[in-house]
Image (cartoon, rainbow, N blue to C red):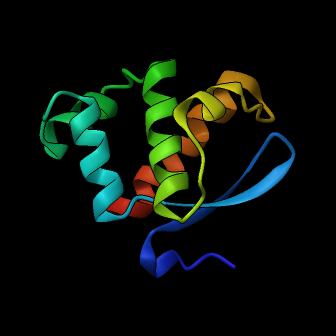
Amino acid sequence: MVNSHRGEIEAELSGRRYTLCLTLGALAEIEHAYGGEDLLSIAERFETGRIGATDAIRVIGAGLRGAGNAVSDGEVAAMTVEGGAAGYLAIVVRLLKATFA
């Protein structure tokens, strides 16, 4: 069961339910993936709606690992989600809202 007070969400990927959470370590992983760019700059970029497939893989992967799932970005890239591209973006938006709201 997810704990919304900890910023956790649940999402179905490739037919399996996962918990995702952007812990401090997961956020640092995202910063590193963007060349050390700070979280505010990354969040501002996402707020403009500029979220690509690589962004979704990075954020979903970091969220999965932050919740304790041993999964690589390559494995995340191969996962399917209901709704296709819009489904991936919905997961990213829910995870960011849970983390920063």
Which residue is at the far right? Answer: 15
Q: Quadrant of residue 44?
A: top left
Q: Is residue 27 above or below residue 52?
A: below
Q: Is residue 60 above or below residue 37?
A: below
Q: Nearer the viewer, residue 9 or 14?
A: 14
Q: Quadrant of residue 45?
A: top left
- 7 horizontally vs 36: left or right: right
- 18 horizontally vs 44: left or right: right
Total count of labels: 0
Residue 31 position, x and y percent, is 22, 40
- 21 horizontally vs 12: left or right: left
Identify the residue shown where x is 49% and y is 53%: 63
- 99 horizontally vs 76: left or right: left
Identify the residue shown where x is 59% and y is 28%: 74
Quarter of the image with the C terminus is bottom left
Identify the residue shown where x is 45% and y is 80%: 5
Residue 17 position, x and y percent, is 78, 58
Identify the residue shown where x is 58% and y is 63%: 9
Q: Is residue 3 above or below residue 66?
A: below
Quarter of the image with the N terminus is bottom right
Residue 65 position, x and y percent, is 50, 55
